[in-house]
Amino acid sequence: MDKYKKQILKYVERMQADKRLLRRIFYFAPIFYKITERFFGDEDGVMISDLTLWFLAQAIAESNLDHKAKSPAGACGLMQLMPDTFKFINRTLKLGLDDIWNAKQNATAGIGYDYWLYKRLTKYIGHLPYEFILQVVFAEYNWRLGLWSMFKDKLREGILPINEFPDETQKYLTRIKYYYFGLILINNGQSGRNIS
């Protein structure tokens, strides 16, 4: 088994062993689906169920799906939003949210922020496969807004310059990817041991 599959196996086993996380996944999955559909339902070429798994994976990487999580920097809730980001996306997308600690509102703002970044990126780097654009969205979410401008030529060619990102952002993207594949296996009723 190669290193990549071993890492996925490690994440799947961790997810399956964490009963609290599994309960949170099954509780939040339909909520995330509805929110994802709200923002991305009209986008061509995206699969809402697939996007939902990506955003759940992002929330696991951010907070382990803990709506009470707070980072030392002040990021709050499931999606680990800074209060100013919560206010910005609420105002920009006219979401009518007022409680960053409310799990559904936090998820709405976080996925709404992902959507805002996604739309911005498709405007600037073109319509590449959504899975590629999502990686750039997650990097901007984690590292810095405007990341696309630093790497626009590479991004327009479909090259993700991940090795040029800070270590923290590289690890963040890797964690999201492993959680995403873990969610696929859990969603299909498989254990990590079934990876061939």
Image (cartoon, grey):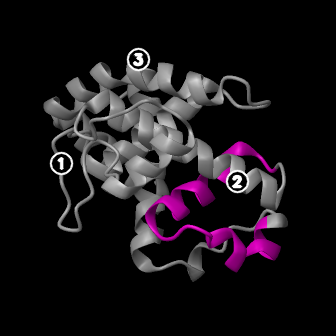
Q: Is residue 3 above or below residue 180?
A: below
Label 3 Cα crowd, 10 Å radius (few <14 / some 14-19 / many 20+):
few
Q: Name the front one of labels 3 and 1.
A: 1
Q: Amino acid at mark 1?
A: Ala
> Which residue: 52% across, 39% down?
112
Q: Amino acid at mark 3?
A: Pro
- Percent x, y of residue 99: 27, 36
Residue at image location 21% in from the left, 24% down from the top: 23
Which residue matches tag 3? 30
Which residue position holds label 1? 69
Q: Earlier in the sequence, mark 2 or mark 1?
A: 1
Circle 1 sits in a helix, a strand or a loop, which is it? loop
Residue 35: image location, x then y, percent: 49, 25
Q: Position of residue 138 (x, y in %)?
A: 52, 56
Residue at numbered disc 2: 120
Does the magenta run of residues contain 133? Answer: yes
